[in-house]
């Protein structure tokens, strides 16, 4: 999934993305009044934020997973806490001998949250809606594009997905264009979730009263105040142990956690030193882990001056990521020498990176067709934000480039609610602040999804026929070792061509109240809330 433009731990996104809530007039030791009472020992309290972009609440168009999407909606398969692929609405599936035809058997008890029966035809509707050009999904080709006919429908050349058939109410047949080991993984992403057609077509604000199939149902939503979720009595798997989820918009993170107003919060760089101290009382609540995330900035490869390889390499070699991590992030990240994060299969500790070398960077810039800083056109750095505010992460990048290369960088900010829509529309500068978090533990989800010439998430329009050929070979390779070797070769090629400047692999630091049981810090987003419970004996009195 697209990394949020600010550098935040991924699990914060998992728990808080596109959510809202209100301040509590009492502490969690009592009961919260939300048009009635929700028992404290049956309510999980989270902090969050609210997007004003309706596309963020629609599984077909959302650019991130987690939060509301995982609570309300579900699909054929998902990951559990052990990162194993689990049957969801599909209770089983069979794959043809040539690996291209998947036949899914849906659970006979699968229902939408209003009790309406869920059938294979609902998946056909949902996926064809995602592929419909009018939906303007920027994720359908990434996650469903292997299905025969999706590309044709997305381009307007077909009215239906030819590789998708409802054989009967409980049997869905899916034909993909070639055998691909990672195909099932892609179906864990929200684009593949099932929607209720009547609900979606009930009005433009249908997402405010969604009729999903997930473990929790949205009961109340007061914009910029709160959301209240209740477990769905029609969920087809085991009922979650926690009955209610209350998401508080005006959460101040750590302060709200200390005041017993939320049960889980992420720890940012400003507070990390304090929480890491074993003498700090909150240290006992700390969960730490490595994400499958890579932060980077993208160079627009078909716009001057980044259409020149030597300029891209110069900007990469003028950046000191170790200093950046220590000064800006307080040490709360790992240096990203390449694309794959350490927890990802295919991570290569022997990767040859572009080192921090200001002298060589200046030489490369002088050797470029632009002849040095004086010959460069105006350069604009696009970030998510408001007005003229420049965050410390952006300021550090620009300062290093100015000091080491003698260049001038202009900064433009785009409202975070419109950021990725604007990027996808091509309305941005030559440098883009972005990044990526794995949706599934496979290197294809980074290399192919981000850097193939035809990839919809190739924001910088980087194109290398040699890389494309390598990635296409890796898609079909069935030998695991050979496949990993191909992706490592592809990563080295990407590093050498410098279409992006790799910055960090993020780390997650989460505080979780001791009465919350079952919490596991996973490297990719999963529907964790359904696995949690509350030990009432440990609640504050």
Image: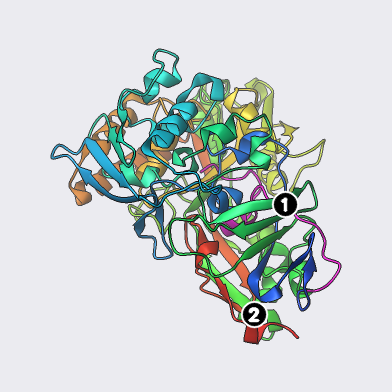
The residue furthest top is 157
Q: Between residues 318 and 524, which one lies in front from this camera angle?
A: 524
- Residue 500 locus on image (x, y percent): 51, 37
What residue is at 65 percent from the left and 27 percent from the top?
Answer: 422
Q: Between residues 68 and 360, which one lies in front from this camera angle?
A: 68
Q: CA distance from mark 1 to mark 2?
A: 34 Å
Task: Please rate how many residues cluster around mark 1, counting C-alpha atoms within 10 Å: few if below 14, some from 14 to 19, many from 20.
Answer: some
The residue furthest left is 97
- Residue 347 locus on image (x, y percent): 36, 54
Q: Which residue is mark 1?
A: 220
What residue is at 70 percent from the left and 38 percent from the top?
Answer: 416
Q: Between residues 215 and 110, which one lies in front from this camera angle?
A: 110
- Horizontally, residue 155 falls left or right of residue 508, namely left
Q: Name above or below for residue 324 compared with residue 180.
A: below
What residue is at 45 percent from the left and 36 percent from the top?
Answer: 450
- Looking at the rendered image, the disc whose residue lies closer to the viewer, 1 or 2, is 1
Residue 496 appears in view: no
Quadrant for the C terminus, please.
bottom right
Magenta span: predominant SS is loop
- Residue 321 locus on image (x, y percent): 57, 52
- Residue 3 locus on image (x, y percent): 56, 45
What residue is at 63 percent from the left and 87 percent from the top?
Answer: 537
- Horizontally, residue 299 falls left or right of residue 85, namely right
Read off the magenta span: 1-27
Q: Is residue 17 magenta?
A: yes
Q: Name above or below for residue 420 compared with residue 446.
A: above
Q: Which residue is mark 2?
A: 283
Q: Is residue 198 magenta?
A: no
Tag 1 secondary structure: strand
**Quarter holding residue 147:** top left
């Amino acid at each position: 999934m697209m990394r949020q433009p600010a550098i935040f731990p991924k699990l914060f996104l998992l728990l808080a993305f596109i959510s809202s809530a209100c301040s509590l007039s009492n502490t969690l030791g009592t009961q919260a009044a939300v048009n009635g009472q929700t028992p404290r020992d049956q309510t999980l309290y989270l902090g969050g934020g609210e997007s004003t972009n309706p596309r963020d609440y629609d599984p077909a168009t959302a650019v991130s997973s987690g939060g509301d999407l995982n609570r309300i909606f579900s699909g054929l398969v998902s990951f559990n806490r052990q990162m194993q692929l689990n049957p969801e609405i599909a209770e089983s599936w069979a794959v043809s001998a040539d690996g291209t035809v998947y036949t899914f058997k849906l659970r006979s008890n699968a229902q939408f949250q209003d009790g309406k029966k869920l059938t294979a035809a609902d998946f056909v509707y949902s996926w064809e809606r995602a592929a419909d050009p009018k939906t303007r999904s920027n994720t359908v080709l990434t996650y469903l594009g292997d299905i025969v006919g999706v590309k044709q429908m997305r381009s307007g050349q077909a009215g239906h997905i030819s590789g998708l058939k409802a054989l009967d109410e409980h049997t869905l047949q899916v034909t993909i264009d070639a055998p691909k080991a990672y195909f099932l993984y892609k179906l864990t992403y929200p684009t593949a979730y099932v929607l209720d057609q009547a609900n979606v077509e009930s009005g433009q604000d249908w997402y405010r009263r969604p009729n999903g199939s997930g473990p929790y149902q949205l009961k109340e939503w007061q914009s910029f105040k709160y959301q209240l979720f209740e477990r769905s009595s029609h969920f087809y798997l085991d009922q979650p142990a926690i009955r209610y989820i209350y998401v508080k918009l005006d959460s101040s993170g750590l302060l709200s956690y200390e005041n017993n107003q939320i049960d889980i919060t992420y720890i940012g760089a400003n507070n990390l030193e304090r929480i890491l101290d074993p003498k700090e009382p909150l240290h006992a609540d700390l969960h730490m882990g490595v994400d499958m995330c890579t932060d980077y900035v993208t160079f627009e490869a078909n716009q001057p001056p980044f259409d020149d390889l030597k300029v891209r390499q110069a900007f990469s070699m003028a950046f000191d990521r170790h200093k950046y991590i220590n000064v800006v992030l307080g040490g709360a990240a790992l240096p990203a020498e390449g694309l794959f994060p350490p927890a990802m299969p295919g991570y290569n500790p022997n990767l040859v990176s572009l080192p921090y070398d200001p002298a060589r960077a200046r030489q490369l810039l002088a050797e470029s067709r632009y002849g040095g800083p004086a010959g460069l056109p105006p350069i604009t750095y696009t970030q998510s934000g408001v007005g003229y505010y420049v965050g410390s992460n952006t300021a550090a990048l620009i300062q290093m480039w100015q000091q080491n290369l003698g260049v001038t960088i202009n900064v433009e900010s785009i409202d975070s609610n419109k950021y990725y829509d604007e990027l996808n529309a091509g309305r941005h500068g030559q440098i883009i602040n972005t990044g990526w978090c794995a949706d599934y533990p496979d290197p294809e989800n980074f290399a192919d999804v981000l850097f193939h010439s035809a990839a919809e998430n190739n924001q910088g329009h980087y194109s290398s026929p040699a890389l494309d050929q390598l990635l296409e070979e890796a898609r079909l390779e069935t030998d695991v070792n050979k496949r990993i070797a191909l992706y490592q070769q592809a990563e080295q090629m990407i590093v050498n061509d410098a279409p992006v400047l790799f910055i960090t692999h993020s780390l997650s630091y989460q505080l979780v109240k001791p009465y919350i049981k079952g919490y596991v810090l996973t490297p990719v987003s999963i529907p964790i809330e359904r696995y949690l419970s509350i030990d009432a004996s440990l609640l504050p009195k």
